[in-house]
Image: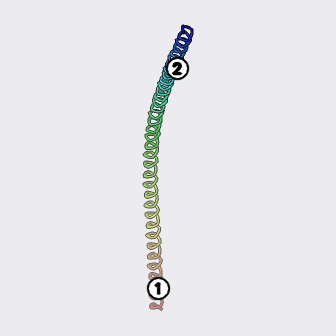
């Protein structure tokens, strides 16, 4: 009987050791999974931080570009307004020049009319004296 008891005890010991090994294996596996999960979370957090940093850099660049564009638009608007004023001045000058030309032409026509009338009057005087 002792042999059977010894074998039984050895089997129970073996089963107990196997169960303990299984428990240890599960604990190791759980620890590894927990470690991997922590590593994944840490990596995710680092990636999120990198993304935030990139977003901030992009926002800064976008704002600088907007400022530059506004400055360019302001200069362009100023140049456009300046050009409009120059165009208006040119139109005014042209209108004035045309008006002067018309006045000269009217004066010339009046002078021609006066000369024509004077010549007619002189011709009438000459005819009247004959």
Q: Position of residue 91 (x, y in %)?
A: 45, 61
User: Which residue sits furthest top?
Assistant: 2
**Toward the viewer: 18 or 129?**
18
**What label sits on residue 120 in the rendered view?**
1
Say which residue appears at 47% left-offset and 67% top-offset.
101
Type of colouring: rainbow
Please tell me whether mark 1 sits on a helix, a strand or a loop: helix
Instruction: Say left or right for 10 vs 115.
Output: right
**What label sits on residue 22 in the rendered view?**
2
**Toward the viewer: 101 or 63?**
63
- Dots 2, 1 in contact, CB < 8 A: no
Say which residue appears at 46% left-offset and 78% top-offset.
115
- Pick the quarter of the image with the N terminus: top right
**What label sits on residue 2 in the rendered view?**
none
User: Which residue sits furthest front?
Assistant: 1
Neighbour tally class for label 2: few under 14, some 14-19, many 20 plus, Cα within 10 Å: few
- The answer to whether residue 13 is above or below residue 72 is above
- The answer to whether residue 11 is above or below residue 90 is above
Q: Position of residue 129 (x, y in %)?
A: 45, 90
- The answer to whether residue 33 is above or below residue 70 is above
Residue 88, quarter of the rendered image = bottom left
**Toward the viewer: 78 or 58?**
58
- The answer to whether residue 56 is above or below residue 33 is below
Tell me the distance, in whole angstroms, between the alpha carbons under discs 2 and 1. 141 Å
Q: Position of residue 70 (x, y in %)?
A: 43, 44
Neighbour tally class for label 1: few under 14, some 14-19, many 20 plus, Cα within 10 Å: few
Q: Position of residue 65 (x, y in %)?
A: 47, 39
**Toward the viewer: 55 or 85?**
55
Please tell me whether mark 2 sits on a helix, a strand or a loop: helix
């Amino acid at each position: 009987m002792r042999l059977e008891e010894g074998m039984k005890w050895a089997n129970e010991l073996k089963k107990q050791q196997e169960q303990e090994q299984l428990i240890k294996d599960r604990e190791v596996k759980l620890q590894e999974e927990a470690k991997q999960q922590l590593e994944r979370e840490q990596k995710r957090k680092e990636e999120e931080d990198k993304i935030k940093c990139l977003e901030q850099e992009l926002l800064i660049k976008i704002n600088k570009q907007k400022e530059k564009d506004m400055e360019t638009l302001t200069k362009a608007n100023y140049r456009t307004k300046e050009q409009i004023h120059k165009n208006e001045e040119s139109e005014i000058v042209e209108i004035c020049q045309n008006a002067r030309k018309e006045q000269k032409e009217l004066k010339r026509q009046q002078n021609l009319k006066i000369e024509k009338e004077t010549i007619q009057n002189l011709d009438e005087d000459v005819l009247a004296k004959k």
